[in-house]
Amino acid sequence: MGLKISKKLQNEESVSKRGSSFKFSFVPKEILNTLKEGVKAKREDNFSPAWNAVILLLLGLVLFGFLISQLASLQIVKGEEMLKKSKRNQVSIREEKALRGVIMDRNGKLLVRNVASMNVYLSIERYIDSKGYVDTVALEKASNTLGGILGDLWKSENSKTEEQFSSLLEKIYSTYEKDTYFTEILVARDIDDEMAIKIKASSNELPGVYIDSGSKREYLHGEALSHILGYTGSVTADDLKKLKYAKITDVVGRIGLEKEYDEHLMGDDGEIAWEVDSLGRRLSEEGYIVKEPVSGDNLYLTIDLDVQKKLYELMEQAVVDYKAVGGAGIIEDVRNGELLALVSNPGYDNNSFIGGISQGAFNELLHNPRNPLLNRAIAAQMPPGSTFKILVAAGGLDAGVLTRNTVYVSRAGYTFTGGASFQEYGNRSHGPLNLIDAISVSSNIYFCEMIRRWDMNGLVPYLKKFGVGEYTHIDIPGEASGRLPSPENKIELSKTSPWLEPVWYPEGDSCNTVIGQGITLSTPIQMANWTSAIANGGKLNTPHLAKSFEKERGKREDVKVEPVRTDVVTENSVKIVKDGMWNAVNGPRATIRPLSGIEGVSVSAKTGTAEFGKVNEKGVYEHTHAWVTMFFPSENPKYVLTMFLEDGGQSYNTAKVAREMIVWMKENGKL
């Protein structure tokens, strides 16, 4: 028994045969019948032989005209289609895969390269019989043999089909549906030497199965860059529907920059042709080059490899030291949004995904309680704690409800109108505070007093300007949007969160919001970006990782990135907030002492300890996230450094790690 491979293939031979000669049977029956009836009628009326000759002449002209119109249709209207079908009875074309573009850091240090690999292909022509049917018996035998050799690699390559045999049939049909020029299909990538030996030893049982050289990705710096770079994988049926540039034998980016810039990196495949018969069987062993492959574009990043690796190393140690679940660290150029480092810990080995990861290994990653597959730098949505106060201060200044010298009193026993208590962190009491003091000591009561005299709906537009609750549009997939704390959003959220009431309390909800708690959620990349807007005077950049592309002949093209907005806050408001952040590190009431006294570098910063989870018997939250965000040098800001430790204790933990990073950058000429 057999399965017909394609209606296209069935019809091609008959089309070419019909194209060489036409018969009058092509003339529609209606025309023939009409003419015949006319001739019969004339004869019955005893017309002269001269009239009969005229009628025959007319009949001949009609038939000749129809024949000409059909020839014109085939040769002119459908000429290109017929030519393609004719060619497919003459040649078989195999792809010569183009090398994927490599990825480098800003200084040209290699991050991703291509290395040699062995791939397994199956020649479809060996499984097509003389009538154009698939020999399913032979194909099933070959699939069983391959399954025994390839094992998990085979299964991972065909994870969407239950059996190898069904998968091969699917690939055969998919290949011919896409383009009948190509008569090989890719069965498995990156096999090892042992598999190759077994396949060659089983050649009698595997007709048409062969091994050819190819390339695979190699990620040179492991976990430190895994969340940035991502990894590649074989094309799926869904990819073919979504990606116009993808073919069935391609490798495409799955996540990270490999996915974001997939089309740039992929390149243009070449073609090698062989002469074949009408059923696609090769008539010669050697092919000829139809088109040379063109390598994909090389990608230069904004990342500095040395800075990235050092920040990852410090973050990894901090997670251990402070018993955190994980962490993130970001260094952003305040002038243009370039990212020198984007760290998420824990990372994972993206090399394990090349060629297909086993289900067991993937399950280990998926169910790891520390969630190594989560890119915390762009997707960890957490309450920002007191770091949020710098945005609230900027909004209050711009709206005119605050000045530099506005004073509120921080005291014990502070309550709302209804008697509910509200206090400073650690139940401290700071006394009279102006705005600079309030930022320095991170006063909860000061900002609560401010919002009680204002209105939350008045603050929300300023938070939006800083990008709160919005995507930064960083050029890497998987970014989360965080959450804007507004009365409208709380009511909407209450529909799916039974622990929330569908009402906004003007005192309680507003005061929780201005200290970075309540329903407020931010990602590390958002915090780094809004800190950058304060440092540079009010421009909200688009953070990005791609710096330039390099074409095959060495021509470089810079990636153009525009800021999100340039008028976030006024220059005066920014100046006052920056002064507050400087005093938080260096002033008389400073609370971020670990960042002071760094030789040759002045730092301005704000910390945040975000409470979450259960409250103990003393009314204290048992768990806290640790945040710090800063810019430096203070006098002429160049970089922002934002650090986050998930369930990492007090904010000064991140401040101590940040100090180590800045000292290292200074000592190694990175400032």
Image (spheres, grey):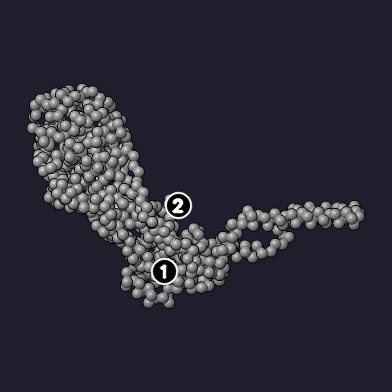
Vertical relation: 349 (above or below) 558: below
Q: Secondary structure at mark 1?
A: helix
Rendered residue at 24%/57% (across/down):
221
Q: Secondary structure at mark 2?
A: loop
Are the residues at dot 1 and dot 2 in contact (C-beta closer than 8 Å)? no
Mark drawn on residue 143: 1
Tell me if residue 545 comes above or below residue 419 in the rendering: below
Q: Amino acid at mark 1?
A: Ser
Report the number of discs: 2
- With 78 as the anchor, is 585 left or right in this view? left
| Disc on the earlier residue, 1 or 2 | 1
Give the labeled residue for mark 2.
244
- Crowding around mark 2 (Cα neighbors within 10 Å: few <14, some 14 to 19, many 20+) is few
Is residue 325 or residue 578 the one in the foreground?
Answer: 578
The residue shown at (44%, 62%) is 292
Q: Amino acid at mark 2?
A: Lys
Task: Please state the horizontal and vertical placement of residue 266, each as a whole percent of the image.
Answer: 39, 56
Question: In screen coordinates, is 331 left or right of 151?
Answer: left
